[in-house]
Image (spheres, helix red, strand yellow):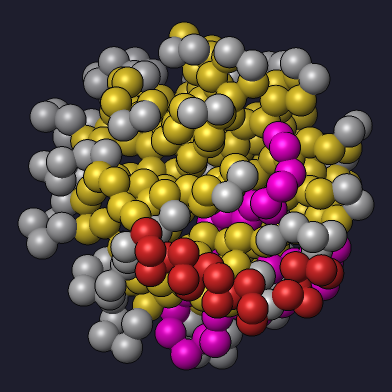
Amino acid sequence: MSKSAFSLAISALLILAPIACDKNGGHDVYVSGTEKNAQGKDVATLWKNGEALRLSDGNANVFARSVFVIGADVYVAGYEETAQGNSVVTLWKNGEAQRLSDGSAVADVRSVFVSGKDVYVAGHVTNVGWNWDAILWKNGEALRLSDGNGNASANSVFVFGKDVYVAGHEKNEVGSDVATLWKNGVPQHLSDGNANAFANSVFVSDKDVYVVGYELNEEKKSVATLWKNGVLQRLGDWSSQMMAQSVFVSGKDVYVAGSEWNAQDNAVATLWKNGKAQFLSDGDSNAWSNSVFVSGKDVYVTGYEWNAQRNGVVKLWKNGDVQQLSNGNTNASADSVFLSGVAL
């Protein structure tokens, strides 16, 4: 989509949804994700105040994974599959696409963060040995965070002052995935490497560094995990499967979005506030919460839930109340929520 077309679409959405904006304290609510079209292709999609805007033309599978808004500029990071089976990391600024990788390898992207004039995108690209390299792109230039000897991924980026934090994981010499935090390119291992552990999101508040993800035990059960300044806190007791996908800190409150599996083995969309779980879905079908954003007293969570046809339906929960963003006729998912006019 051209920049002018995107601007016209955004203007139309402002006319269509002024009430939604008012209900959110004057902030616009953006959700990035993917929705299949009638031809079965995944279309990168941005919902603004509940109205969908397509970032791709539907001729190839394209995924929008993360959204960041600063001033009047809307950044979305994702990737596009090629005819050769590889993928191209893509950054949309106000709807105009910029390619960050050349399509010669499989690539993925998980996070975008904008600080001043600098735009950071975190993800991974396969190398010649078919290992994943954890990559941080800064203004389109790729910085490799891992050594390429084992699979690694960069899942989240956050900038605080002059410091750039990236959360992800990398395999150690015995083949275990180690939850990892890179600060200015220098890795810190958050887990001991005896079992697989993954870091999915990082947030910095008042110089405290929060990272969430999950660990696996010997029985391959996963537990949602929070590290604060490297100190481990588990959000469960291994009695059920749990994963943490996103963290947001507001004042003294720490919010974590993820999922916990119930006795029927369904994933339940879950929000933890200061370690206490709130279930957002009823558990009758699988549901996942993937991103959390807080503005004042309002807590926004996005993700998706299966309907009776086993199609994913994009959901936005505000203070526990749910809004459906996709129609459920085709499969859809959401990975990121962001409010305009809120400084991180």
Quadrant hosting residue 330: bottom left
- Residue 56 position within the rendered picture, expressed as x and y whole percent measured from the top left: 32, 67
Q: Is residue 286 left or right of residue 105?
A: right
In the image, residue 252 sits, relative to residue 298, either above or below, namely above
Q: Residue at x 49, y 12 (%)?
A: 184
Relative image position of residue 252 (x, y in whole percent): 90, 32
Q: Give above or below for 49 relative to 230.
A: below
In x, y percent, where is residue 253?
88, 37
* Residue under the image location 38 percent in, 69 percent down: 5
- Residue at image coords 84%, 60%: 25
In the picture, residue 42 is in which quadrant? bottom left
In the visual, does 288 lie left or right of 41?
right
Measuring 37% from the left and 59% from the top, which residue is drawn there? Answer: 3
Above or below, 192 against 8 in this view is: above
**Do we see residue 132 in this rendering?**
yes
Image quarter (top left, top right, bottom left or bottom right) of the N terminus: bottom left
Q: Is 100 colored magenta in this rendering?
A: no
Q: Nearer the viewer, residue 191 or 281?
A: 281
Residue span colored magenta? 315-344
- Position of 33 relative to 211 (above/below): below
> Going by the picture, which residue comes out furthest to the top?
186
Whole-percent x, y for residue 259 in the image: 66, 56
* Residue 304 appears in view: no
**Residue 211: quadrant of the picture:** top right
Q: Quadrant of the C terminus?
A: top right
Is 194 situated left or right of 81 in this image? Answer: right
